[in-house]
Image (cartoon, helix red, strand yellow):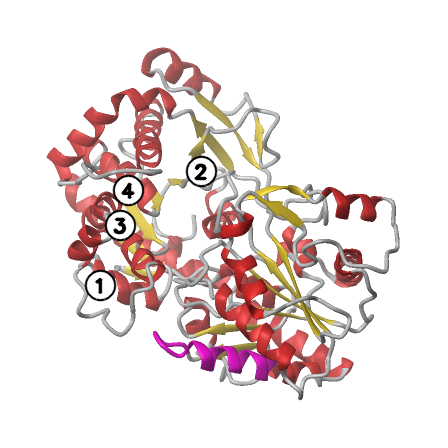
Amino acid sequence: MDKNTGTFEYLFESSWEVCNKVGGIYTVLSTRAHTMQELFNDKLIFIGPDIWNSENTTDFKQDTSLYSDWVSYAKETEKLKLKVGRWNIPGRPIVVLVDFKPFLKERDAIFYAMWEDFKVNSIQAYGDYDESCVFAYATGKVIESFHRFYKLKDKKVGAIFNEWMLGMGALYTKKHLPEVSTLFITHATSIGRSIAGNNKPLYTYMEQYCGDQMADELNMQAKHSIEKQAAHHVDCFMTVSDLTAWEASHLLDKAPDVVTPNGFEQNFVPQGKEYDQKKTAARDRLKNVAEKLLGHSISADALFVSISGRYEYRNKGIDVFIESMNRLRKSTDYNRETVAFILVPAWMRDARADLKEILDKDITTSYPLQMPFLTHWLNNMNEDRAINQILHSGFTNSPDDNVKIIFVPCYLDGKDGIFNKSYYDILIGMDATVYPSYYEPWGYTPLESVAFGIPTITTNLAGFGLWAKKHLSGEKIEEGVVVINRTDDNYGDVADSICQSLQALSLKSSEERNMIKTSCFNLAAQAEWRKFITHYFEAFRIAEGKSSERTI
């Protein structure tokens, strides 16, 4: 390995999102894997949860020739049920999937040991805490088993653990394998996300908040406890942005040792003619679905705008997005036909049968479908916040409205029943994206947008937004990224700023929009993993130095 990458001969990395696409951490790991694999040459081993039947995941390809002797030994002597194979992404790194469910019966003993050894308080645990922490424990057992079977005691080994869900894995490894260098990344503090999600002003009072006290108030004691103890006890604690570093310093009482911003890989973006073909195909599909849903034609040069991400209504700025589209709709100065797409998975029941039939049979209609702003039926239609805000705002998606809005409440995995395209194959068809985040430790969605040549609007409360401001003013759509100043209480100003940026974009010529696309590509090139990976090298050196001191 290059001397600048640290000295690890093996590197393990574990996450709930290994071969399990849930959120942004999947994107972090899957895009970084290619660069890491080039450095470690199959000595990089990801560990994820075995929650799939073999026929249910296309991400994981089992390979029984990999470490077969260890797999048999672990099963017979340590009762570890493992599958080893490769992650079907660029770099094709080795993956170990562990069935953690047998350890659930040991939950109480595991949690007691964590209290005894590290003062992790699991008493008030609920929800996904048990499964996440037992999986983390199983991850530690996997590393321990591999380490001992292949006699790695004299090798330099590192282990990265992502988010509070893997905290117990980090602590187990720290205790039972003191020679292994442990690294823990918090992508967003659990208590910070909870404060923001409960409509409390996070930023105005950040320096006055006590993380432990707020955990008690918001019933977040267990998650906060494991996250805090992992941050304090590992060899190297990392966060993904300066924004999260500030948050961790105050809410976890621990400043990170290294900030490791999230990069992207250009091998996820089509090039040349393929780019143009995919863009045309995406626009055709978006236009066709909109026309069938609305019952009237959409202009060929309509502006397609979207928001995407997890369904965190306030944190992700979904509320501001809808409000800004409503203000744009009512504006007498805005004349460009616009279709706004909310690409946010919700509690979906099924693809709409009426819409699906019209699409499949290519039926042309002159009337809108019922609820002409929804592509998939929801289980909680009456309680859905996006639907209620759309209705309350007065959207009808009539031909007379310049701005229409469509909620796509499904995972765009290529088999949703309506679009049947992956998220990236839909994103490429957009003219702009909007991510007016209130709480966004990094912000992969705007980075993905510019990587695909799509200008984006984000805020200074997103880690990506702060990073982008180091490279451009963030004030003009011509630069590819607009970074809006957002505070605890300027909701209306943010909505107005979004309208102004889209108004400016709508007036650009084709040539000017191509120049904006080039600006997007140029900025994305500054965020490639080959540049950001150096931050990990620093983290590796810190962690290895501390573990070496323990074993002298």
Sequence-wise first label, 4 or 1:
4
Label 2 vs label 4, nearer the camera: 4
Q: Position of residue 69 (x, y in %)?
A: 44, 17
In this view of the protein, can residue 34 be seen by the observer? no
Cα distance, mark 2 to mark 4?
Answer: 16 Å
In this view of the protein, can residue 297 be seen by the observer? yes
Query: In the picture shown, does residue 36 fall above or below 319?
Result: above
The picture quadrant where one finds residue 119 is top left
Is residue 496 located in the magenta-colored stretch of the structure? yes
Give the residues in magenta.
Answer: 486-502
The residue located at (52%, 43%) in the rendering is 21
Decide: marks 4, 1 in contact (CB < 8 A)?
no
Sequence-wise first label, 2 or 4:
2
Q: Residues within 10 Å of mark 2 (few under 14, many from 20)?
A: many
Q: Which residue is mark 4?
A: 167
- Residue 46's tag is 2
Cα distance, mark 1 to mark 3?
Answer: 19 Å
Cα distance, mark 3 to mark 2?
Answer: 18 Å
Q: Which residue is mark 3?
A: 543
Q: Which residue is mark 1?
A: 249
Q: Amino acid at mark 3?
A: Ala
**SS of the residue at dot 2?**
strand
